[in-house]
Amino acid sequence: MGSAYSGAVNDILSFLLTEPSAPPELDSVETWWSHHVALMSRFPAPADLALAGGFRADRLGYAFASGYHAAHRFLFPMLPSDCPTALCATEPSGAHPSAIQTRLTPSVSGWTLTGEKTFVTLGTSAELLLVVASEGQDAQGRNRLRMVCLDSKRPGVRVTALPELPFVPEVPHAELRLEDVAVSPDEVLPGDGYTRYLKPFRTVEDCHVQLALLGWLLQLGRRHGWPDALREELLAVAVMLRGLAQADPSSAATHVALGGALARVKHTVTQCEPHWAQVDAVTRERWERDRRLLDVAGKVRAKRLESARLKLSGEPPRDEA
């Protein structure tokens, strides 16, 4: 196992250091996806796929998309690797377990699914939808959540594109409405929808999106002649985060380590600031527009870290969003 792991590390390191640094022009989500799929056979490990996908992106938005999909590969390895997916959790009242009102109801042939999701990343391009739904409440009155995987073209499924965001506008988002959608028993994934999927996804997504960011910055650094020391720091942080991405995403220890890793990524991104002047104007302007993406969910991360610290100290953790 050790030699296999070392080989995989060497493969992605070699790619990041020697692959031609000029990225392909990605003019649509479809074009991005075709390039992303082409990397999967070479880099089956989700963390490596995120790094490679970020490196081959021509802008932050598509680097994010590669990290987002790689996170799905980590958490849902049973799904077809060449099928674009979207996680559907957020509802009008949010994505907290208590806010989930989408209902999974028993039927004669399996289940039916009814509800709405208000913000689905890459929803308009997804072929498979991963829908968080409630099958009722437990004895304590808490939502019992399940994860449902269904075809986006299923009767009763309606996906509606949302307006572009002011940052990473290339990444589409959608609303989802589900009206008595037929669901077969094997489309309800095993395990608790919150503890097995939704809760760890936040950690898994952070790891893989940050890896994609680092891959993208390494490509820029090589292409525009950033100092060797800075490129080596980006590479070292990527290797650190790559290891963390393979840790248990539900562990408090992982969350504490991730807090430190994210702080290190932020520091390294700041170290890049003086060198953006060497980057072409189009890429630099996109970065100024899109860098707000890095601050999304900052409060959730801070709360996760605080809860992990409390848990490791023996104090009861606070409820997580």
Image: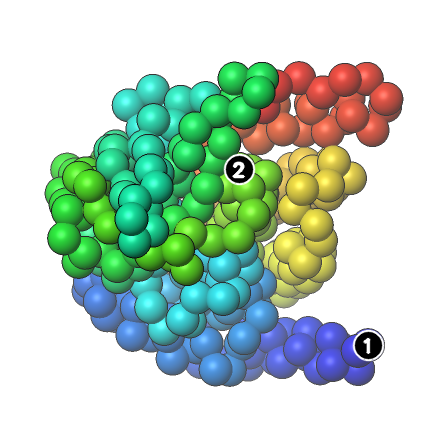
Viewport quadrant of the N terminus: bottom right
Q: Quadrant of residue 56?
A: bottom left
The residue lying at 34 percent from left, 20 percent from top is 93
Q: Residue at x 52, y 65 (%)?
A: 77
10 Å crowding of disc 1: few (<14), some (14-19), many (20+): few
Residue type, label 2: Tyr
What residue do we see at 25% from left, 33% from top? Answer: 115
Tell me the kind of residue under disc 1: Gly
Residue at image mark 1: 2
Confirm whether residue 85 shows in the render. yes
Picture coordinates of residue 53 (x, y %)? Answer: 44, 67
Q: Which mark is residue 103?
A: none
Percent across and percent down for residue 50 are 50, 63
Residue 43 picture location, percent across and down: 53, 76
Residue 23 is left or right of residue 271, and the answer is left
Residue for badge 2? 194
Observer-nearest residue: 48 or 22? 48
| Element assignment for label 1 | helix
